Amino acid sequence: MDKFIKRLVITSNRLPFVLSRTGENWQIKPGSGGLVTALAPVLGNRGGLWIGWPGTIELTDISKPMEIASSRAGYSMIPVLLTSEEIQRYYVGLSNEGIWPLFHDLQSYCNFDPAYWKTYEAINNRFASVILDNTMPEDFIWVHDYHLMLVAQELRKMGTHSDLGFYLHIPFPTLDIFSKLPWRSEILSALLDYDLIGFQTLHDKRNFIQCLRTMIKDITIKGKGHVVSAQIGKREVRIGSFPISIDYNEFVELAESKEVADQAWFIHKDLPHCQIILGIDRLDYSKGITYRLKAYREFLDRYPDLHRRVTLIQVVVPSRRNIPMYQDLKVEIERLVSEINGQYTRSGWVPIHYIYRSLDKTELLGYYRTAEIALITPLKDGMNLVAKEFCAASIEENCVLILSEFAGAAAELQGNAILVNPYNIEEVASALHTAYTMDEGERKNRMKKLRRSIRRHDIYWWVNSYLEAAIAKNLDNFPVIADYQPRIDLLSLDNLV
């Protein structure tokens, strides 16, 4: 491909930071989640763009905090402003009460309010307008995740001929589940306006292709391997699987730091003579936290000789607090923790240490480095980067990863992780016993192989494999600019609301 690509433009629902205001003062906090973890180090100092919602419904001048955030990141950030009503319908509504549960095989949780769809269309159109106003034809525009599946279609209507890529970070469901979506045809047709559609796993890609063959007339799928082509009339769209990853070297370097070593020492000092079982999850019903707690209770029931020898540290990071279902989930998790601790706690030993808050990076890595067993059991997950982060940070390698077979990461890590069905409480309890009793030699051998795989297929490998499939280029074509001084031309707020 001879086309000159000038900039890499990332578009996602959220910018990689959260903007909030207390009185007259703006606060800028780093964003969280797999997308930010993955892409922030890749785009840093490359002089590109990141377009998204800044996390505030304040419809005031935010140019100053935006400039500060951009200067720190080494790339420009363009805000898409949303009202509280739009957030309620587009983000809380269709995105997280409709698409999210459906794509995680939890269709009984879905709410398909027609008003949600109308707002979803309008917000996708607004994102497209902001992209068009801030990009050039030579830019590669890479749109991320289920909130923005219609953006390419809106851009094509506006006349853009830029290369457009899309990446879905969550699973893509099977035909029988996807068919329940009232706007299934509209979404499939809109996705086909991208030039490359990327998924986490081969399984997700196969599900998508099956939906295309069933619901789209006169479509032909060509090729084999991780990237294939769909022919619709004269138009060709590439479809591929690109498992996302982490910045492996950064996690290793941080895990080896004195700050993290000190943090790990303090954690183990407070829990002497115990193997630590670690669960870290965002508050979400797809993470299987209640099933995990029940499996841990089964483990304690079945192996009373291991009381005082193990402790579960369960970290739950607050998320989507304004959705009633998430509030109910928090109550249920805390009820189970209280019930289990009430039943099994003895003098000097509490079976579960429950933490409900975000962790800073040093504290997070301290827990990763300290834990002997990671218990990562989502009911369904696009990838689950916590599994990869845990392995990267486990520099002593004397630890075990227990992983749900329904996490996207299972396809890559299955040979050396202990895979479990998170719905099978007895199986998870048995896996905990297997992990606890596994000898040091086997632990080290398994973890060494897991870490080698993650190091080989790190975040830069992921980006390069996607860019090469999309535009026959890689990150070397977007070099780091050491003395880059970012420039941000903010849109008038009148154009955004």
Image (cartoon, grey):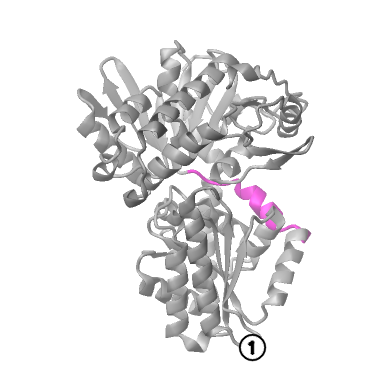
- Mark 1 neighbour class, 10 Å CA radius: few under 14, some 14 to 19, many 20 or more: few
For mark 1, what is the residue? Answer: 347
Q: Is residue 106 above or below residue 124?
A: below
Say if the magenta span includes residue 249. yes
- The residue nearer to you, when weighing 107 against 60, is 60
| Residue depicted at 20% across the width and 22% down the height | 218
Q: Along the horizontal axis of the image, is 221 left or right of 126?
A: left
- On the image, the x and y values in percent for residue 272 come to 67, 80
Residue 197 at least partly seen: yes
- On the image, the x and y values in percent for residue 185 come to 28, 29
Q: Residue furthest top?
A: 159
Which quadrant of the figure has residue 490? top right
Q: Amino acid at mark 1?
A: Ser
In the rendered image, which quarter contains the C terminus?
Answer: top right
Residue 469 at least partly seen: no
Q: Is residue 233 above or below residue 242?
A: above
- On the image, the x and y values in percent for residue 406 come to 38, 56
Which residue range is magenta in the image?
244-258
| Residue depicted at 43% across the width and 22% down the height | 152
- The residue nearer to you, when weighing 497 against 271, is 497
- The residue nearer to you, when weighing 162 against 491, is 491
Magenta-colored segment: predominant secondary structure: helix
